[in-house]
Amino acid sequence: MRIPGWISQHLAALRAVLLFTVVLGLAYPLVVTGVAQLPGLRGHANGSVVEVNGKPVGSSLIGQSFTDADGNPVAKYFQSRPSASGYDPDATAASNLGPESIEDTLGDPALDPNSEEGDGSKQALLTQVCARSKAVGELEGVSGARPYCTSDGVGAVLRVFYTGGLSGKVTRAVSVNQACPATPFIATYQGVNVECAKFGEDYSKGVLVPVRGDAPQASPVPADAVTASGSSLDPHISVEYAKLQAKRVAAARGLPVEKVDALIDEHTTGRVLGFIGEPGVNVLELNLALDRG
């Protein structure tokens, strides 16, 4: 008995599905998994997990924080690059804030900022950079001052109101990132007293004016100390940032700075292929080397 053509076509399709299911769905994954577990490849395939005394302490590919229970930096450890995701591997993402993110959203003073809902405040990228630079400067004993930042660590930005809308005589100026009762970072702007910002007021008709200030162009606090990476999980910091932290770490551990500097050099990786990117220091591996003495 001859099988109809349409049935033959379906049987051929079914055989193809079964064949490719076995080859690509079972055999290929098993072969790849087996190869990945060969000596020399196993650690990379399993996430480059770093263990101490048989217990995992992190991954050499993922950054993590070295802070106490209150979120304060532990003095004896090198600090990682900031993270927009809290170093959560399941939430890797950038902040998506760009150079035009300079005006904060003020929180409701009637709400508790530490509550689960928060007070509704939101920091612009500029204020995040300014706050981090101030904190790093205080931690490392250097100036954290940066252009367009106030001394209290927020973006130095005004909303300026003109008689002609976008031009003309200045009639009002508000330091929009400094909530009242803060003292504005400058007292006057073009002859007009600068006001602190009040929650709930609409300043949208004013022109945003960043004020550079008198901070030097080059800050002793490097860029990677105040900005998160694209993944927010970068395990490396720049050599410059590592050297900045060396004095603090050495003092906290009672070690010569020269020994700490030598460890930094030992854990510095070069540019990819010799010309891509910049040299970096793996923070986890450096801290573990310090712990080993």
Image: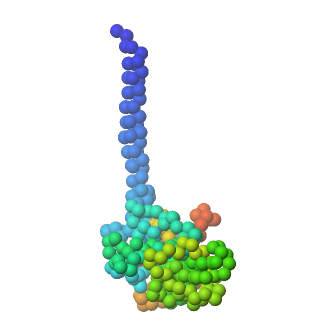
Decide if residue 162 is in sight here. Answer: yes
For the N terminus, the quadrant is top left
Q: Is residue 259 above or below residue 102?
A: below
State the image quarter where residue 206 is shown. Answer: bottom right
Residue at point 46% right, 81% down? 198
Q: Residue furthest top?
A: 1
Q: x, y (%) of residue 202?
A: 50, 74
Percent across and percent down for residue 74 are 39, 82
Residue 137 in view (yes/no): no
Question: Does 197 sit left or right of 193 as displayed?
Answer: left
Of residue 64 and residue 269, the one placed in the foreground of this image is 64
The x, y position of residue 211, in whole percent, is 61, 81
Depth check: give the residue in front, 131 or 167: 167
Residue drawn 61% across and 64% down? 276
Instruction: From the viewer's perspective, tell me whether residue 154 is left or right of residue 253.
Output: right
Q: How is the image coloured?
A: rainbow
Q: In this figure, what is the number of numbered marks? A: 0
Quarter of the picture containing the C terminus is bottom left
Residue furthest out toward the right = 168
Q: Residue at x 54, y 72 (%)?
A: 204
In front of the other: 15 or 121: 121
Determine whether 256 is above or below 25 in the image.
Answer: below
Question: At 41% across and 81% down in the image, what residue appears?
Answer: 73
Image side of residue 82 versus residue 279, left or right: left
